[in-house]
Structure formats: C-alpha cells, structure tokens
Amino acid sequence: MDFLHNWAEYLPEMLSGLKLSMLIAAVSIVVGYPIGLGLSLMTASKNLVARAIGLAVVEIGRGAPALVILYLIYYGLPKFGISFESLTAAYIGLTWNAAAYASEMFRAGLQSVPRGQIEASQALGLHPWPIFYRVRLPQGLRSAVPGLMGLAIQMFQGTSLAYGIAVPELMKTSYSIGSRTFNYLEVFILAGLVYACISMPATWITVYFERRIHRRYA
Amino acid sequence: MTLTGVEAGERAGNVGIDLDHISKRFGDHVVLDDVSLHVAPGTVTALIGPSGAGKSTFLRCINLLERPDSGTIRVAGHTIEPGKEIRSRDLAALRSTVGMVFQSFNLFPHMSVLDNISFPQQNVLKRTKSEANDRSMQLLERVGLPEKADQFPTRCSGGQQQRIAIARALALDPSIMLFDEPTSAIDPEIGLEVLAVMRELAAEGMTMIVVTHEMQFARDVSDTLVVMADCRIIERGNPREIMSEPTQARTRQFLRAVLER
Amino acid sequence: MDPVTAVLRGVPMTLYLTFGAFVIGAIGGVPLALALRSGTWPVRAISRLVVDFVRGVPIIVWLFVLKFGLAGEGIRFTPLTAGVIGLGLVSAAYLAEIYRGGLQTVPIGQLEAANALGLSRSVTFRRVIAPQAFRIVSPSVATYLMGLLKDSSIASTIIVGEIVFQAQSYARQHPTAVGIIPYVVAGLFYIVLSIPVAYFSRKLDRRMREEIY
C-alpha cells in the first residue's frame, strides 16, 4: 500500500508534465489539422508543382517516424546553425507529423463522398467551386471526423516522444522522478495510468461518434 | 456410398414437418404470434404476405437459425421444444433433414463452386473427396451448370449462384427444402432459371416450404398456400381458390397490391 | 566510418524488433480478438478493457516499464528483449482490434449458410469465417506492419542498437554539419520502405473488395 502514498507524492509533478503534454498535443492538432487539409488539397491538385510539394511534405511527415523528425529538428538542424528550443522543436516536429497523417484522412474523407452526389449537382447545373464548397467539403469533412478524433488521441500519446528531446512533458517528468527515487516501476505505472485515463475515455467517445455518424448515413 | 438423383428423390419427400404454436419476440416487438403449420410429406407450401409479416422469421425457425420462444417442432421422429433446452443430437438431425436456400445465396466466396458443394458433404456426411466431388458434379449437371465447377462464385451471375446454392443444399440429401425469397435478389428474367429448378424439384416430390413474392410460382406449383400478415397466419388452403376468392380482407388487400403490378 | 554505413548497422536490430514483435502480435491478437467477440459478457468486457488500456498507454512507457520498472523488482530484461516484448504486447492489442473488425465484416449470411448446412462451430470458424476475415484484414495488417517498423525506432530510447540509436551515436560523435546526415539517412530508410508497401496495400485493398463483394 506504500505505492499509493508515493503516487500521491509524485502526482503534482506528473500533472504539470501532463499539462505540457496536452499543450503540445493541442498545438499540433490545432495547427496541424488545417495544414493537413491544405496538404490534402495540394496532393489532389492538377498543378504539378503543388502536387509534388504536397506529396513530399506528406510522405516525409508520414513515412519517417516521429522520433526521427524530432531528432532531426532538435539535434540535426543546429549543425547547420538553426537552433530551436526543445519545446519549439517538439511543436514543429509533432505538428508536421499531425498534418501529414491528417492530410490522408481528409483526402480519404473528401474522396468518399458518393459520386452520385457530384453527378446530381452537375446535372442541376452547379459550378465546380460551389459543388466543392457546398457538397463535397461538408460531407467529406464529416466522414473524416472519426479518423481525426482517433488521430488526436495518437498525437496525445505521441507527445511522449518529446522525452527524447528533453521536453519536460509527462514521460520525461516520470523518468526524472524515477531516477531520483529509483521507484521506476511505481512511477511508470502511474504514468501509464494517467495516459490511459485520458486515452481510453477519448477512444470510447470516438467510437460513439463513429457509430452515430454511420447511423445517419446508413 | 453414392446416391443417385433418383434414390435421393425417393428418400426426400417421405418426410413432413409439424410446427405447433411457434411464437417469437425480439424484446418488446412480437414477430410471430402462435403460428402453427402442418406440412405433409412431398408437398410444396408457399408462404406469402406483406413485408414484416414474419414469413422469413418463421422459415428460419424451422431449421432453428432463429430460436422461437415457445412451440414445438416435430420432424423425422424427433420432437424439439426450442423454448426449453435443445439437444445437440436433435439439432444435428434437424439440420441434416432440412436444407435451406437464402435470398442472398451465401455461397462461400473463397472456395470454388465445386468445393462449395463438396466441402459440406465431406465435413458433415463424412464422404470421401471423390464421392463428394462425384455427387457435386451430378448436382451441377442437374441445375445446368457443370462448366462452372472450377470457377469462383463471384464470377457467376445471381441466378447461377442461386442454382449452385440449391445444389449445395441438395448435396446433403435433405428430405425437406426451405427457400427464403430465393429470387428476390435476382433479375426477374434470370430468376426464371431458379424457379425452373425449383419446379423440377417439386415435380420429383421434394417437400418444400417457399417464402416468395412470385405469385405465379405460388399459384402453379404449390399444394398449399399460406398467407401471413401481422405475425400470424390469416389464411391457408388451395392456392387457386385463395387467390381468386380470398376470404380475408387483409389477403384481398395484399393480393390486389401484388397482382396489379 | 561514413554516416550511411554507421546508420545501416542498425538495420538487423530494427528488423529483429519489427518481426519479433509482429509475430507475437499476430499470434497473440487472435485469442484477444475472439475474446472481444465472445458471447460471454464478462469476457468481452475484460478483453475490451485490456485492449483499450494497452493501446491507451504510449509505447515508450511500456518499454520503460519493461526495462527499468521491472529491473527494480529483480526481473532484468535486456533492452532488446524488453523492446520485442513491449512492441509485441502493443501489437497484439492493435491487431486484435483489426481482427475483430474483420470478423465482424464477414457477411452474417455466411454464418447462417454454414449453420444451415450443419457445419460444426469450429469448422465454420476455421474454414468459412476465418479465411474470409483474413482476406478482409490483410491490407490493414500490412499497413500496421509498416507502422510497427517505424515504432521500432522508439526502442532507441531504451538503448537498443537499431537504426535511430546508431544515427544518434554517430551524430554525437560528429558535431559538424556531417552530423545531420545520419538523421536524414535514418529518415530516408523508413520513408523509402513505406512507399511501396503503401502503394501495394492500396492496390491489394481494391482487389480484395472486388473479390469478396
């Protein structure tokens, strides 16, 4: 029962780490998702340059592990004289990661709008821009929502990788406590519980929304 | 041990089935309300009626794909009371006596047509591979599709898939065949192929219970017409009589809507 | 030594981690998936909690629990063992969820036909349901495997000598501009591997849909 007492001791410090984790996650989502939407439009564009740039950004952001991107920005760039603070590097790296994955979800969502809708709109005489803006986009975004919610949860868990670049978020904080007290097991179990207490309900809410959206369109 | 088509036909049609006081509900929703049916051996019973009347559910109760809440099923010397415990021995006997053909065919897409028909024979009847394949080819000839043996179901049209499904069910030598809206998912023109096979089966004396919207088939081929509406049987008897002079208003209403098309 | 060779020295470990964890996950996911679909409510609930919990904790935390946490209690794993077990555990949970979705997608008519034919439950599962579910989930499993390859990089934090670890040690020894190259090489390794798999996965997905439906 000792561990409960220890947990109470560690909790305040860990919660401040949690706050930072959530802040990083929030920034990467709020900034990354709109960028992702833009990237998805670029990768679908008829313009070759736009498509090439979009694809490059997405395939690198998705293809490389988040950890590598973070190391590249925080450890690699300084060798070229571009130095970022650890937190800033985390923001940039994880936002890039989020944008790349989000762009795939937006692309899939926009593509999944039934062709019949577009054909009907064209038959009615609507022009391409209104068709995109009023028919494809609203429905496409709606079907991308569950995937984006799931991605948000992954981004939250992904902030734990900022440990590798010395950001005092939840994981790093736990490690610090662990190396001070040598109670690694207790500390990391508590850290796991904190992550799970946020991820699990968030996942259940996502599943709930997924079912609701399905029901409306089935 | 192989059975020729004729031998199988002789065994089939010697068996009838009795269903007494079958009731079923899903939660608060009553689906079958005290439905009883006696099916004489060698007869064809057509089950018609508006959607939601419980026809498909009732059919599925016959081979216990759905479990009724109460009632009795008597077939081939076995008495089954689904409301209480069902012995696996009885269930196995029931399933081997009764064959079923589904609206959506339900062929196994990952097996060839021949394997679709042979695999259940090998597994349930313990026939050897060559016995099973011989019987399968026989049945494919009978439904007119021997050339499809090595193809996969997705390469076949709906009407072909349904005929193969009939062959698959027949391969287990059932004595009773159930058909759940066999032509509803098929083009009307192609559906005629399936109905032709069913007519032959009936002419050979198979006991059949068919849920269908095909009124001509019901009138020409069935010995007993059963009309279901609102979860119960509202009329039963000679198909020609009922269709020309229905005694129930509900039947009249239904027939008018269907026959007017 | 040049940066490229230095980084590629980590490839064996990367592959070992990835495939070791994948085998554990691919096999371990099966009983979990069956439990998730169990008819018994408590079994379903407990397996649901276990799967969601394992997926709800970041991989790096699992690795640290296995390497440092258990070491404190006397169970010492080598970094590699901890890496494979941790990644395997998480994989089992994710793959269980993928399998479950696949099993659910097999049309219920298949089960009905098998029942109507009198096929036993185990034969129905083995010969009718599972083969179809396998085809349905293969693209998702391939995608997951790609993700697992990338996640193997997390083991660098518990000192497994895979690609990213090698890149880091090279970079530390070379404070000049050359020091960025290992990270670029590491990144390219994953990117180059992910492109063909993503392409094939998309093609496979389209073909699966045609065959089954």
Image (cartoon, coloured by chain):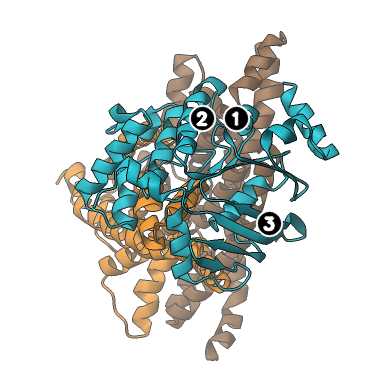
Q: Which mark is residue B36?
A: 3
Q: Which mark is residue B220?
A: 1
Q: For the residue labelled by badge 3, is the local secondary structure a helix, a strand or a loop?
A: strand
Q: Quadrant of residue A2?
A: bottom right
Residue at mark 2: chain? B
Q: Residue furthest left?
A: C1
Of the two numbered discs 1 and 2 on the same chain, state the one appearing first in sequence.
2
Say which amino acid is labelled 1.
Asp
Q: Is residue C106 above or below residue B141?
A: below
In the rendered image, residues at marks 1 and 2 fall on the same chain: yes
Q: Which mark is residue B37?
A: none
Q: For the residue labelled by badge 2, is the local secondary structure a helix, a strand or a loop?
A: helix
Residue at mark 1: chain? B
Q: Position of residue C92 (x, y in %)?
A: 39, 61
Name the residue rendered at 58%, 29% in the picture.
A110
Q: Nearer the viewer, mark 1 or mark 3?
A: 1
Q: Which residue position holds label 2?
A: B195
Q: Which chain is cyan?
A: B
Say which amino acid is labelled 3.
Ser
Q: Are marks 1 and 2 in contact (CB under 8 Å)?
A: no
Q: Are marks 3 and 2 in contact (CB under 8 Å)?
A: no
Q: Tell me the quarter of the image containing the C terminus of chain B.
A: top right
Of the two numbered discs 1 and 3 on the same chain, state the one appearing first in sequence.
3
* The colour assigned to chain C within the rendered structure: orange
Say which amino acid is labelled 2.
Leu
Q: Residue furthest top?
A: A125
Q: Nearer the viewer, residue A10 or C63?
A: C63
Residue at mark 3: chain? B
* The colour assigned to chain A within the rendered structure: brown
Q: Position of residue A117 (x, y in %)?
A: 65, 21
Q: CA distance from mark 1 to mark 2?
A: 11 Å
